[in-house]
Each structure stands twice: as C-alpha cells, then as structure tokens.
Image (cartoon, rainbow, N blue to C red):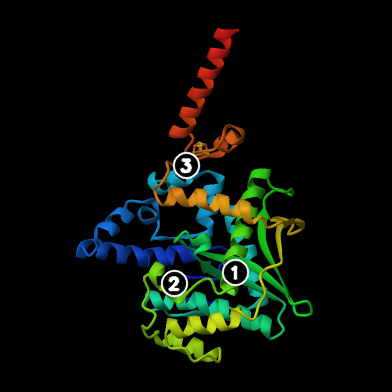
Amino acid sequence: MTDFGSGDAWGDSDEDLLIDHVEKYEKSRQDSHVINNHCDDDDDDKLVTPLYKFRPGYLWVSDFTRQNWCEQQMYYSFTVPTIFEENPVMTEGSNLHLARELAVHDVTQVKVTSNEDIWAVKVINLITALQTMLNGGTIVREVPVFGCPYNTDVFIVGLVDELKFDPETFTLNLSEFKTRKFRSFPSKSQQNTHQLQVMLYKKLFDDLVKGNVSKDTVARHLRLDLHKAFGDDILQTIDSKLLSSTNLSQLLDDLYTKIQCFTCVQELEIEYQHQESKDIIGKHSVTYDEDRLHHMFNDYIKFWKGKREVRGVDIEEAFKCQSCDFADICEWRKRKAEECSKRNKSKIDNS
Ligand code: SF4
C-alpha cells in the first residue's frame, strides 16, 4: 500500500490524516482562487454553501457519519473553535487499525508534488487492492472508494476497512472494524451510524464496478488536470505495479478496466473488538437498504447544498447531548427544551 511522504501518513486507521493532507492543499487553492477573483456568480453562490464553506466542494464518508450522529454537533465543530485532544481510546483504536492493515500489506512512503499526485496515490491503492484479489488474495484492507451517488452532483470519498474476496464463488464481503472501550456492542444510535457508513461504502464501490463514475466527474469535482504528468515518485510506484500510466487519465482507465472484472459487494458486516483484551465482541451483518440510504443521502445533501437549515437531534436521542462538547451553547437544544416546557405548561393549564 502506498503512503504519503513527509510524515503525512495515509493508510492509517481512518480517513482523518488524509483529510488533513488534502484539506491543507485545497485551502491553499481556495485562498488563491479568492485572491485571483476568478469565480463567476455561480461560484460565488456555491462558496457560501456548507459544501464549500466547511469542505473543499466534496465530502468524506466520515462527514455523513458525523452528520448522522448529530448534524448540529458537526456544524459546531466547523464553526466553534475547540481544542482537539486525542484521548487514549482513540489512540488505541488507531493502533489496532494500523496493526490490522500491516498484517495484510506493507506501507511504502512516496513523495507527492501536486494534487494530481495525491489522488493518484488513492487510485493506485485501489488498483493494488483489486490486483491482489485478482491474483488470488482473499483479504485487502484500507481500500479507497469514491463517486457521485444518486446523481446529486456531490463527490464523496471513503476508505473501506476491509474487503474479503471468495475466488470460488467470486463474491465480495465488505467489513468495517470498530474498537470499543467497553466489552459490549454500542448503542442502537451508534450502530445506525455504522450501518450508514458500510452502506455508503457499498454504494461507492458498486458504482465504480458499474462504470457510473466518469473520468470527467472525478476531474471536475476534485479540480484535477487529468493530463498533468505525475511526479517522479508516483511514476516509480506505478512502474513497480507493472502499470505504465503517466497521468490520471491513463491511471483511471487502468482502474476502470480492473474494477469492472468484479461483481458488486454482496455482504456487509461490522466487527466490534474490545480494545484492552483485543477480544472480538461480535459481528453484525447489515442488510443493504437502497431506499433508506437514498432517502438519508438526499436529506443530508440538502444541508450541504444550503437548501435547508442545520438540525440537532430528535427528543428521543437527547441522551447524545449529555456527552456533547457543545451542549452549553447549543441553540437547538435550548429551543427544544423551551418547546418541551411550553407543551408541559399548556398540559398543566388544560388539566
Ligand atoms: S447538544 Fe445535542 S443537539 Fe446540540 S449539538 Fe450537541 S448533541 Fe447535538
């Protein structure tokens, strides 16, 4: 598996490090875009939507999982300055993810010299995973996926924890690995978030298999030059994989040729592991529900496109507010508490 150089590691347990890397790059592009004043009226409108205000015009699967937990909380995380402190539980979770990744492949560092190089790393890692399975490998980990689900014209990027391939039945099983401080399954709400995550991964992978993600879509949303020549490190890495692409256009052609040899993902699973003992708590299989995913996705995209106001949790999920860093300043919570006390008062008045 290929990794970024200069200490910015991708191939770690989750997407956060990669997000960081790309965001820094995108921020510098956005700043120069504004200074150069090259945006037309349409671009001006776009820049004020959450998709452009808080994200570089595309999203990560982890944005949806955070939104699924509480959209208002995610919104505050973008707008209210907080000090992020990594706690021991997160560090241990990352270590366990990394150990699993290293159990199936090595990580090589490469130097990236452009945004095109950064995205080439992602495509190379996906091609490598596919090649491993085509060569008889049964497990690949940290597999990048991307696409524009449901014609919403919003580009999504994700990193699948694990794909298991059965060469006899030619079936694919997609797994997400979660570590737990306590030796128990998480709450129903957390399980819902994990289910959304694996369903979205499947949607992105399947769309690639079906040829639903064009090169133009990738170039337009990520603002990439498909014909820009890769840097030396990327060219060497591509050569070591016995490929001959010199730019993203050719590399994406290689990807599409390989991925179309596969079938869509058949099974979805979430595996929970206890951090301290490393015991497996258990596995949940997830039934893919296209209607549910489509409905949730469309609803969430409305927020990102600025077509509806931000929302907090429903009253049934108010328990989430107890452990929320923004509980003291949360306007949604305040409004819901006022509505509740008004309702109670009118019940008493009418009794
Ligand atoms: S207090 Fe509750 S509604 Fe407000 S951001 Fe936190 S979890 Fe969401």
Location of residue 61 with respect to 147 vertically, above or below: above
Of the residues shown, which amino acid type is indicated by label 2? Val
Q: Which residue is found at the position 31% from the left and 65% from the top? A: 28
Q: Distance between the residues labelled 2 and 1?
A: 15 Å
Q: Mark 2 points at which residue?
A: 218
Amino acid carrying mark 3 in the image: Gln
Q: Does the residue labelled 3 lie within 8 Å of ligand 1?
A: yes
The residue wearing badge 1 is: 205
Q: Is residue 304 above or below residue 28?
A: above
Label 2, label 3: how far apart the Cα atoms are: 29 Å
Foreground of the two, 34 or 112: 34
Q: Is mark 2 within 8 Å of ligand 1?
A: no
**Which x, y percent locates residue 235?**
45, 88
User: In the picture shown, does residue 311 fall above or below 143?
Assistant: above
SS of the residue under disc 1 = helix
Most extreme residue toward the right, as rendered?
A: 168
Of labels 1 and 3, the one closer to you: 1
Asked if the residues shown at circle 1 and circle 3 are in contact, with their CB atoms under 8 angstroms apart, the answer is no
Circle on res. 328: none
Sequence-wise, which precedes: disc 2 or disc 1? 1
Q: Is residue 48 left or right of residue 74?
A: left
Can residue 105 be seen in this snapshot?
A: yes
| Marks 1 and 3, the one that precedes in the sequence | 3
Identify the residue under disc 3. Answer: 72
User: Which of the two residues, 89 or 71, is positioned nearer the viewer here?
Assistant: 71
Q: Which amino acid does the dot numbered 1 rest on?
A: Phe
Residue sitting at x 42%, y 85%: 247
Quarter of the image with the C terminus in it: top right
